[in-house]
Amino acid sequence: MVLKSNSKVLTSLTPFFAMACIGSSRLCARVEKLCQQSGHFAQIRRRFTTTGVKLHQESQRPVTSLVQQCRQQNQTTPRDHTFSATRAMSSMQTQQPGSLPDLHVDPYRLLEDDLKDVYDDIRRELIMNTTVDELKTIATYYFDGQGKALRPMVAILMARAINYHKERNGLLPSQRQVAMIAEMIHSASLIHDDVIDQSDFRRGKPSVNVLWSQKKVTMTGDFILAVASMMIARLKNDDVTLTLSQVITDLVQGEFMQLGSKETENERFAHYLTKTYRKTASLIANSAKAVAMLGGADERLADVAFQYGRNIGLAFQLVDDLLDFVSSSSTMGKPTAADLKLGLATAPVLFACERYPELNPMIMRRFQEPGDVAKAFELVHKSQGLEQTRFLAKKHCVEAVRLAQSLAESPYQKGLIVVSDLVINRMK
Ligand code: GRG
C-alpha cells in the first residue's frame, strides 16, 4: 500500500517560529528544540465556536485557512524523523502543486449520526452498570451534548480515514467503542479536575462538585473509569488495552506535574510541555492510535495516527491556555483567568517571562501574593506571550495537517485536516 501525500504542501515550521519569536529569541529557540524532541514523550454541531473558520453562507462549509497557508508556503522540510519512511514512499504519489483536495467538509455534519449515537450509547452503558439511581444521575451529568466532542470526533474521523486508507469502508464496532471510551475517560478526568480545582461551573452550568458532595463526585469519576475499563477489556486486544491504559497513567501524572513547578526557565518549558502532553494530548493521541490498530494499521501507520493526535492535543491545550487570558467566562462556559488564580504558569506566562523577568518570582510563589494575578495578567497582555502561544499551537496544527495529508484522500481524512483549523481558531 502506498501512503499518499502532497510534498508541496508539507510546511516548514520555521516561519511560525520566526513570527512567534519576535522579541523573545532565546526562549523560542529552546521551545523549538523541545518541540522537536517532544516526539519521544512517550445538539453536536457547531460546538466549536471559531474565529477563523469561515462558514460558507449556504452550505455552511468551512474554509480551511491553515491548509491554505500550508499551500502558500509550499515548503518541504518536515522535522519529525519518524515520518521519513512515509515521505520517501509518498514521493511516488506527489500531487501537482496547487492541487490541494477540496476541503469543504464539516466534521460535525459528517459525523452527526455517529456522534449522536455515541452519546446515547455511553449513557446507556453507564446506566446499565449500576442499580444506584443517584450514581446514574451524576455519571451521566456531563454526557449532556454540550461538550465539543473533540475526542470521539478525532477517534471516529481517524478510524474511518484509516479504514479508507486500507481500502475498507465504514467503522468497526470496536473502533466506535474506542470513541466512547475516549469520551468517558475525558469526562471522568473533568469530574476529578472539578473536585481538585473546586470549580464553580463548566459548559455554562454548575460543575458536578457544586451539586453533589466531593465524595460522591470522586467516586462517580472512578465509576466512569471502571465502566470504560470493562469496555476496554471486552475489546480483547492487548495492544489496545495497553495503549488506552497508558492514557490514564498519563492523565494522573500530568495532574501531579501541575502541582509542582521548576526553577529555571528552560526546565519550566520542558515541564509544561510534558505536562500538556500527559494531561491533554495523550488521550487524543492514544485513542487515535487505538482505532488505527483496530483497523489493521501497521506500526508506522499507527504512529501517524498517534502523532496526529499528539499534535492536535498539544495545540488544543495551548489554545485553551491562551483562551484563559483572552476569552470571557460567558463564551467559555467556565471561569477565565483561572490558571493564574490556581497558581499555574502556562505558555503565555512562560513566554512573557523572557520580556518581563519580574514574572519569575511570581511563578515561583504560584501568584500567591496580593496583586500577583493582576500584575501577571497585565504583563502577559503587554508581552508577545499570547501571540507566541498561538504560533506554537499553529506549528502543531500544521504538523497535524501534514500527517493527515499522508493518508489516502477521503472525506474523513479531510475532516482530520479541518479539525486542525477548528482547534486553532476556536473561541471556546
Ligand atoms: C481519573 C481519568 C482521571 C484523571 C485524574 C484530574 C486529572 C487526573 C486530570 C485532569 C485532566 C484534564 C481535565 C485536562 C484538561 C483537558 C482539557 C483542556 C479539558 C477541556 O476539554 P474540552 O474543552 O471540554 O474539550 P468539553 O467541555 O468541550 O468536553
Image (spheres, rainbow, N blue to C red):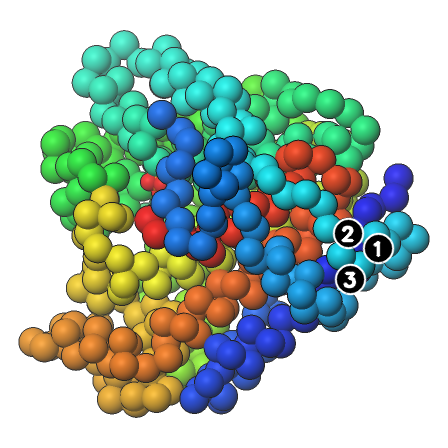
**Residue at the (9%, 77%) spot, across then down:** 371
x%, y% of residue 106?
A: 53, 36
Q: Amino acid at mark 1?
A: Gln
Label 2: how many Cα within 10 Å (few below 14, some 14–19, many 20+): few
- Could you say which is closer to the camera, residue 182 or residue 376? 376
Quadrant field for ligand 1: top left
x%, y% of residue 317?
A: 42, 56
Disc 2 target residue = 99
Q: How far is disc 2 from disc 1 in space, using C-alphas?
A: 5 Å
Q: In the picture, residue 358 is in which quadrant?
A: bottom left
Q: Amino acid at mark 2?
A: Ser
Whether residue 199 appears in this view of the structure is: yes
Helix, strand or loop at label 1? It is loop
**Residue at the (48%, 77%) spot, across then down:** 20
Label 1: how many Cα within 10 Å (few below 14, some 14–19, many 20+): few
Q: How far is disc 3 from disc 2 in space, using C-alphas?
A: 9 Å
Disc 3 target residue = 8
